[in-house]
Amino acid sequence: MLSDTIPTSRNNINENYTNNQLSMSPDDKELNEHDRARIKEFGQLFNRHSSINRELLEELFRKEPSEYTPTVYRYASRIYHCLKEDQINPVLKALSNTKEEQVQAKKTTLDVPKIDYASDKQKRRTLKLAFSVLRYQKIVEELLDETQFFSNYPEIKDELSLVSTILYDYLSRKFQPRDDPIDVDDKEDLTNNDELVSHIETAILQERTRLAAALARNRIKSQALSIEDLLPENVREVQQHSAELPVYAWVNLIKTDMETIVNVFENDEQMKRAKNSTHIDKRTFYVDYHCSNLLVFHYTQKQRIANHYLVRDHLLYLQDKSSCIAAHSLRKLITRKDNICLAYVSGGLFLQLLLVLTDDLESKIYAFGARSDENIRDIQAKIKSLGASEKRVKIFKDRFIDINFDEVNMENCKVILCNPPDSRSALIQPLDFLYNEGEDVTLLKQFSQPTENKGYVRECIQREAAYMRQAVRYNLAKAIVYVTFSKNRSENDDIVHATINEQSENRTQQRKDIGSYKISPPVLPIQFGGRNEHMSVLRQGIFIQFESSQKMNGVFVAVLIRE
């Protein structure tokens, strides 16, 4: 509440100002109810009888900073264009004269072109913006349609994806003009003026009254208190859960040790080591119960840890706990000089963790499924930064399910880590998973849809079954660790049981001296936490499964041991 000591004369002046502003002149006809309400509130700011509080004052005058540059707009729109869903094209609809002329655009998912990012920060921001526009696609395109945006600006009618991308950013910032981010990486070039982006921004600002009015009507119709409330419920829930997910980071035991890293946070950072998550706050951290080299921090410390010199110097690696469970399970199944088969190498972060956990055992890892020669070179560079010997790793572009074990020499390979690309439906922080794990960017599409794509899930199930059948065929292994980031039983329990049953049916065709696989009890602790934090992670008495929660992404792990 403002002070009562403000002179009455000022109250009268502002009351007159308010009344004058609310009187409808011809120019006022362009104002919507929202704009007129804000003008009225502005006129009452210095009224001592006003009930407007400080929170409203701050909201009225708060400058919404922009995270994005024209280059990020361009890159994000490329990704969005390739991954967006089929809609009735608002461009064609706006330009058509009759209903018969309105044509629905036919489009399938396109291959996302390679983008040469200037920095990691630019890449992260591009992925964040592309993911946001994908989630708000229906809302953004409906606004363009309702306001007949492209009828007024036909010269940019072929730039739907770029317009949608820029419009989303302006919607999220209440149509405030964009300034270049203050923390842009030095490697980004801001000197080039992008005339097309500038033209689109000008058009959006000129149409902002009509766009804001259309958005307000949609919110009223949907009884949405915010633009986020217009999203489907399942998409909103993922967004809410991910906001408070703890920060997980594992210690690179090749270059350092746990004691040294813990001392850095206790002494240099003045943080206190807690026993578990019950006692964690922004000034504390703890060592995870299941993963011995994993540190856990409060969610408010995300940027602080990401920018820490320990991360920059490759002593600490950001990776969600869900991605570490299978690696720590595998570690308990091998002994010195036992080698490992990794069925899907992805971006290489999981491979790096395996190298760290097995460094003292001198294990070699055979990794399959690299996307390209460039992907292999990138992973090899990461291994070098990790401090591991390149001789410990051999990477193949061949898919695991396509290889002939008689032609690939996997010397002394004792354990197969079977991690086929799955639906990833148990992830609640897909953007960080994509960025940290180096996953294919098409993953964003699955998390921007209001309902689960059943056809895509069926495709995943077929692939997972094929991976497990292939793993069982390798006669020299003594164990298989199967892992998914799916919440679907059909991708988890059912795949494992089907593999066991199929193996039994084919038993007569197998060599008599080779034992069959059976499901093993978990090799990690199945319960943890204090009395108020007790959590069972045992599924059907034989599997480990962490459900998606505000503590971590979901993960399913099964261990099969050869008899």
Image: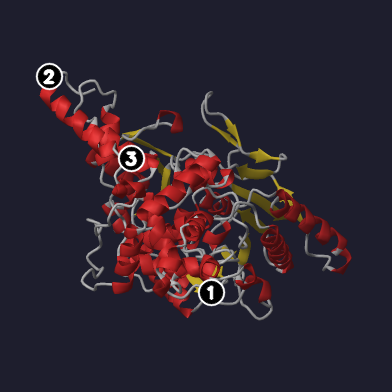
Looking at the picture, how far across and down is residue 370, in whole percent?
53, 73
Query: Marks 3 and 2, how far apart in space?
Result: 28 Å
Number of callouts:
3
Which numbered disc covers residue 5? 2
Q: Which of marks 3 and 2 is nearer the N terminus?
A: 2
Looking at the picture, how far across and down is residue 116, in whole percent?
37, 74
Q: What residue type is labelled 1?
A: Asp
Q: Of the residues tagged 1 and 3, which is closer to the observer?
A: 3
- Secondary structure of the residue carrying numbered label 1: loop
Q: Earlier in the sequence, mark 2 or mark 1?
A: 2
Determine crowd level at label 1: few under 14, some 14-19, many 20+ residues with C-alpha closer than 10 A.
few
Whether residue 29 is situated above or below residue 469 in the rendered picture: above
Between 92 and 350, the one lying in front of the other is 92
Tell whether 355 sits left or right of 208: right
Whether residue 128 is situated above or below residue 322 in the rendered picture: below
Q: Which amino acid does label 2 sit on?
A: Thr
User: Which residue is drawn at the image coordinates 35% and 40% (left, top)?
Assistant: 300
Which numbered disc covers residue 270? none
User: Which residue is drawn at the image coordinates 67% and 62% (left, top)?
Assistant: 456
